[in-house]
Image (cartoon, grey):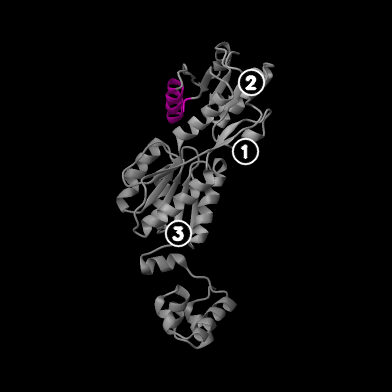
């Protein structure tokens, strides 16, 4: 049976009110002597007392539980690590909810409300899911912060990678290696837009290839001297196909990824890429949400910089090649 405040009060001979003040961290606990506070805490520890946060939230109307809904747990462990690190610093409890394929988001949002969560963090929400969030959650005035979405919603702060800055970083790396015929493979809108802007500003011709099963021969026929892939997954798939065709990288042309996922260093050759700041995204999400809960002003869109990871798939090439 769970240890109660009454049990602790009886064990140390101090009123339940005083025990509650000490264990809840109430300012009024400072009116008690240091020896009394120490005796209460020692007794609670010896009896194995554990505060019931759900019951406490019912009484006080406040909660230290933060719900985190994630579209794909396997893809975002560094973001979750960042969330947990920030939560530990603020003495907050994290409740993770994983969305399975085609699972109804509205049911998960109902769970957030049922657990009286103080706020919600959404990782990798799709556009349709943001509409569900707007309709089924925001009217209840529970603070929410989302990550890595290309859609901004009034009242919902977004933390993301600086997509344009990261794309510029990747392309500048290729440019400095002497590449001028740089193709883009993929269809991530903000990255494709940033690619086109960079190429035109550099006086180069942009060439975007949408990823599809038959695109690789067409891409190679265009004779690029470098390929910017919109994701690491696309980059690794391209490297695998090129190897099967006995087209060697970076001897034939350089290949650049985007993301900095673990798979980018597990292929051969290892994939040069830009590392998205996933841990920092998670940390800042929790920090901003906590500030919202505390009534502080927060940025509506915080963009964090990526960093270059130069590996074996990119190499210097003469502009004349």
Screen quadrant of the N terminus: bottom right
Furthest residue in direction top, as rendered: 221
Q: Is residue 256 above or below residue 223?
A: below
Q: Magenta span covers which residues?
A: 187-201
* Residue at left offset 46%, top offset 21%: 202
Query: In the figure, residue 20 lies in which quadrant?
Result: bottom left
Mark nearer the viewer, 1 or 3: 1
* Residue at left offset 49%, top offset 57%: 87
Does residue 107 appear left or right of residue 278 in this picture?
left
Q: Tell me, yes or no, whether the two marked residues, 1 and 2, touch with CB atoms within 8 Å.
A: no
x then y, percent, for residue 252: 64, 17
State the predominant SS element of the stretch in magenta: helix
Q: Which residue is mark 2?
A: 241
Q: Which residue is mark 1?
A: 262
x then y, percent, for residue 83: 50, 52
Residue 130 part of the magenta segment: no
Task: State the separation of the CA atoms marked 3 and 2.
Answer: 46 Å
Compare marks 1 and 2 and give the one earlier in the sequence. Answer: 2
Q: Which mark is residue 65?
A: 3
Q: Is residue 21 above or below residue 227?
A: below
Instruction: Determine whether the residue tagged by mark 3 lies in a helix, strand or loop.
Output: strand
Furthest residue in direction bottom, as rendered: 13
Compare marks 1 and 3 and give the one earlier in the sequence. Answer: 3
x then y, percent, for residue 303: 43, 42
* Residue at left offset 57%, top offset 74%: 48
Q: Which mark is residue 49?
A: none
Mark nearer the viewer, 3 or 2: 2
């Amino acid at each position: 049976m769970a240890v109660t405040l009454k049990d602790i009060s009886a064990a140390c001979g101090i009123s339940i009110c005083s025990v509650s003040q000490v264990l809840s961290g109430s300012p009024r606990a400072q009116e008690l002597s240091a020896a009394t506070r120490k005796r209460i805490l020692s007794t609670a520890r010896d009896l194995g007392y554990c505060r019931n946060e759900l019951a406490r939230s019912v009484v006080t109307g406040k909660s230290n539980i933060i719900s985190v809904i994630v579209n794909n747990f396997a893809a975002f462990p560094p973001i979750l690590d960042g969330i947990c690190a920030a939560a530990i610093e603020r003495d907050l409890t994290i409740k993770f909810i994983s969305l399975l394929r085609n699972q109804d988001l509205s049911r998960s949002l109902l769970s957030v409300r049922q657990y009286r969560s103080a706020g919600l963090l959404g990782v990798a929400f799709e556009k349709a899911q943001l509409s569900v969030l707007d309709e089924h959650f925001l009217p209840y005035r529970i603070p929410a912060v989302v990550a890595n979405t290309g859609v901004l919603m009034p009242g919902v702060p977004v933390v993301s990678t600086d997509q344009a800055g990261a794309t510029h970083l990747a392309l500048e790396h290729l440019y400095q290696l002497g590449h001028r015929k740089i193709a883009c493979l993929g269809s991530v809108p903000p990255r494709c837009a940033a690619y086109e802007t960079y190429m035109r500003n550099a006086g180069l011709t942009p060439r975007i290839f949408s990823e599809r099963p038959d695109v690789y021969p067409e891409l190679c026929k265009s004779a690029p001297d470098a390929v910017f892939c919109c994701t690491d997954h696309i980059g690794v798939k391209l490297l695998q196909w090129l190897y099967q065709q006995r087209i060697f990288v970076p001897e034939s042309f350089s290949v650049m990824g985007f993301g900095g996922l673990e798979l980018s260093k597990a292929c051969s050759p290892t994939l040069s890429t830009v590392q998205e700041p996933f841990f920092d995204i998670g940390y800042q999400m929790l920090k901003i949400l906590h500030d919202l809960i505390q009534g502080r002003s927060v940025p509506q869109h915080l963009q964090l910089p990526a960093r270059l990871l130069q590996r074996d798939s990119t190499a210097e090439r003469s502009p004349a090649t």
